Image (cartoon, rainbow, N blue to C red):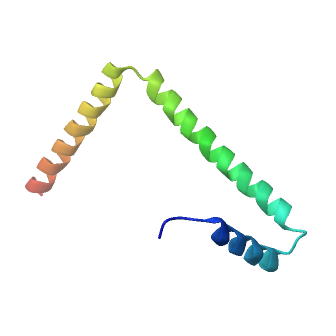
Amino acid sequence: MQGLGLPHILILLVILLIFFGPSRLPALGQSIGKAIRGFKEGLNEIDAESKDVGPQKQINNQNTANTQNSEEKVNQNKG
């Protein structure tokens, strides 16, 4: 399948129109738009946080996680 073409989009719109009705479609579109906007803002916040954390702090966080994983494996082998 190549993706969504114009015929596919038209069929989806007709199905949505039948299922939701013309009065609820604007509200549905608005809520989908808000959800997408919120998702993008969340991704931007995560990206900004990763840029705020310097490379040394990222390395320290990775080393801490690796040390904890190693300690858990040792404890599992002992138990």
Taking the image as shown, residue 15 lies to the left or right of residue 75, namely right
User: Which residue shows up at 83% across the image and 60% down it?
Assistant: 27
Please tell me which residue lies in front, 63 or 19. 19
Image quarter of residue 58: top left
Which quadrant holds the C terminus? bottom left
Q: Position of residue 5 (x, y in %)?
A: 60, 65
Taking the image as shown, residue 16 lies to the left or right of residue 24, namely left
49 up-or-down from 12: above or below: above
User: Which residue shows up at 51% across the image and 35% down it?
Assistant: 46
43 up-or-down from 56: above or below: below
**Extreme residue in the left direction:** 78
Q: Position of residue 23 (x, y in %)?
A: 90, 69
Q: Position of residue 3 (x, y in %)?
A: 52, 64
21 up-or-down from 79: above or below: below
**Extreme residue in the right direction:** 23
User: Which residue shows up at 76% across the image and 75% down it?
Assistant: 14
Please tell me which residue lies in front, 45 or 20. 20
Q: How many marks?
A: 0
User: Which residue shows up at 76% across the image and 56% down it?
Assistant: 31
Q: Position of residue 51 (x, y in %)?
A: 46, 24
Please tell me which residue lies in front, 54 or 71. 54
